């Protein structure tokens, strides 16, 4: 589900760090059944809206929209907006958006028999009352589909493409809808190249700008599966102007470098920023960064590459490791954060998952354990021309088993030229210096945790503090589901069993 946002809590201590206001901490509320929290979908002056999903079987599902009072973050009411739409089909919710007190629910309808899958759109008011229902598109069984809300909230874009490997001319079908689900325009874009496969990794869509599709062609000419190499990663950008049906395709190539992770961001003024990680070994590793700025006429304005120094790598690797390892492993690019002055941050995380199986010959039973590791955060800052200025490491170690990493990773609040990062942490880490990268303590299975807040600006990692923590707090941050939904605040959700609590963290107004 594509919902916006996020997670955490605690009891009543209230602290202010940096430019953050005293938070609004809501009372504890309880959920009566097992649900999957899907984030904060929107807000108005009176209420905050959250979404939770519960699945029993194909015909019995729940999609619970909950309202919370803006004044104190207290639970107000809830409504289940899920219903069976067509008797011949079962419907699965896919994307939920919120705008102007309207909830937009896209679902995929799959028939019990050999029927073509359909995409439906339902509109609800803030009370969960259905206003409209329509079928807006169909999907072939051999297609992937993506649903993207317009950045200016003026409709939606559906993109479909073939999901199987097939050396042929690849196509992307685009359908633009207005906020009522009516077609604004549609077209099929074709690559001039014969491609084995195509995957859309990111979409930027606005009614006032071109459509940008960041694609991975997944080329693997020798048809071999090489899991630990990037030989099959070839990124490209499709830039499309629907008013004159003009398409331009950029293949992202770097001299003697391979791309391992890429993000894009449109600045709202006609320029598209593309940035990410590079390496020189063709492995799934990182040893540098790149940036590319594209003008509104689809010409390249700026491009830069930067290779990390040995001094920077020593923040992640010990002296012994540096002798045999020249690149960072398991670094996952999480986001590109554009600041108000046009400069930006890349935020990434050291992540890996592995499966452990143990066989007991006495019982003839094999036990399987899934390990989730969400470790240190890497931050890289670039000026408005895309030139790399500095990078640093924020130490973090989160190891859990068989929980899908629900309470791991991080969330962040971005305001103008500052970023505040939140994650579950060990209290002892706040006693260390910011550049003490190897003496930090980890959390295993979410034990003895606290909530940490790290403040960044354009010049440095400013500070690291425990955030709104009391000694007997047992509400853990649900960071992976977080994302802010306005420019001045972030909502955080914490869980302890079936008890939850919401807190609102605001940026302080200038004195």
Image (cartoon, rainbow, N blue to C red):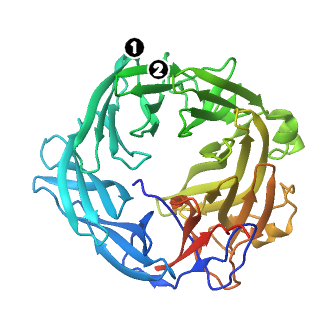
Q: Is residue 348 left or right of residue 323?
A: left
Q: Alpha carbon of mark 1 to alpha carbon of mark 2: how far?
A: 9 Å
Q: Residue at x 42, y 40 (%)?
A: 206
Q: Position of residue 171 (x, y in %)?
A: 33, 24
Q: Position of residue 221 (x, y in %)?
A: 49, 16
Q: Nearer the viewer, residue 485 or 83?
A: 485
Dot 1 crowding, Cα within 10 Å, few <14, some 14–19, many 20+: few
Does residue 509 lie above or below 165 as drawn? Answer: below
Is the C-beta separation of discs 1 and 2 under 8 Å? yes
Quick one: SS at disc 1?
strand
Which residue is label 1 attached to?
192
Question: Image quadrant for the N terminus?
Answer: bottom left
Quick one: SS at disc 2?
strand
Question: Image quadrant for the C terminus?
Answer: bottom right
Q: Residue at x 60, y 36 (%)?
A: 261
Residue projecting furthest to the front: 511
Q: Position of residue 172 (x, y in %)?
A: 34, 28
């Amino acid at each position: 589900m594509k919902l916006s946002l996020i997670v955490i809590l605690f009891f009543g201590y209230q602290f202010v760090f940096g430019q953050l206001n005293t938070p609004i901490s809501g009372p504890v509320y309880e959920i009566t059944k097992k649900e999957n929290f899907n984030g904060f979908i929107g807000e108005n002056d009176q209420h905050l809206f959250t979404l939770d999903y519960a699945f029993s079987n194909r015909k019995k599902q729940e999609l619970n929209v909950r309202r919370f009072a803006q004044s104190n973050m207290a639970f107000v009411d809830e409504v289940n907006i899920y219903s069976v739409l067509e008797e011949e089909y079962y419907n699965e919710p896919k994307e939920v958006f919120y705008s102007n007190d309207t909830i937009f629910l896209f679902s995929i309808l799959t028939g019990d028999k050999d029927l073509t899958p359909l995409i439906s759109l339902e509109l609800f008011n803030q009370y969960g009352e259905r206003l409209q229902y329509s079928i807006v598109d169909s999907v072939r069984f051999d297609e992937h589909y993506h649903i993207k809300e317009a950045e200016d909230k003026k409709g939606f874009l559906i993109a479909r493409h073939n999901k199987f490997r097939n050396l042929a001319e690849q196509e992307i079908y685009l359908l633009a809808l207005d906020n009522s689900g009516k077609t604004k325009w549609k077209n099929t874009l074709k690559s001039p190249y014969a491609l084995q496969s195509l995957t859309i990794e990111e979409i930027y869509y606005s009614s006032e700008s071109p459509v940008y599709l960041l694609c991975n062609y997944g080329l693997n000419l020798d048809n071999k599966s090489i899991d630990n190499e990037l030989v099959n990663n070839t990124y490209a950008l499709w830039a499309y102007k629907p008013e004159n049906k003009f398409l331009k395709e950029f293949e992202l190539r770097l001299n003697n470098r391979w791309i391992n992770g890429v993000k894009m961001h449109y600045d709202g003024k006609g320029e598209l920023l593309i940035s990410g990680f590079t390496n020189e070994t063709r492995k799934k590793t990182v040893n540098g960064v790149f940036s590319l700025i594209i003008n509104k006429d689809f010409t390249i304005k700026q491009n830069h590459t930067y290779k990390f120094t040995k001094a920077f790598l020593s923040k992640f690797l010990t002296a012994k490791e540096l002798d045999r390892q020249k690149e960072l492993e398991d670094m996952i690019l999480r986001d590109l954060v554009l600041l108000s002055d046009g400069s930006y941050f890349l935020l990434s995380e050291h992540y890996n998952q592995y499966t452990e199986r143990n066989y007991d010959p006495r019982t003839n039973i094999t036990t399987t354990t899934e390990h989730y590791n969400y470790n240190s955060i890497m931050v890289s800052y670039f000026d408005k021309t895309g030139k790399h200025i500095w990078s640093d490491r924020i130490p973090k170690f989160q190891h859990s088993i068989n929980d899908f990493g629900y309470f791991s990773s991080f969330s962040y609040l971005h305001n103008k030229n500052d970023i505040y990062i939140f994650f579950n942490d060990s209290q002892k880490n706040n006693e260390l210096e910011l550049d003490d990268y190897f003496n930090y303590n980890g959390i295993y299975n979410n034990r003895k945790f606290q909530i940490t807040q790290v403040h960044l600006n354009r010049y440095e990692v400013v500070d690291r503090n425990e955030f709104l923590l009391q000694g007997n707090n047992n509400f853990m941050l649900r960071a992976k589901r977080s994302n802010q939904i306005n420019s001045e605040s972030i909502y955080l959700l914490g869980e302890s069993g079936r008890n939850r609590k919401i807190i609102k963290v605001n940026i302080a107004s200038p004195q």
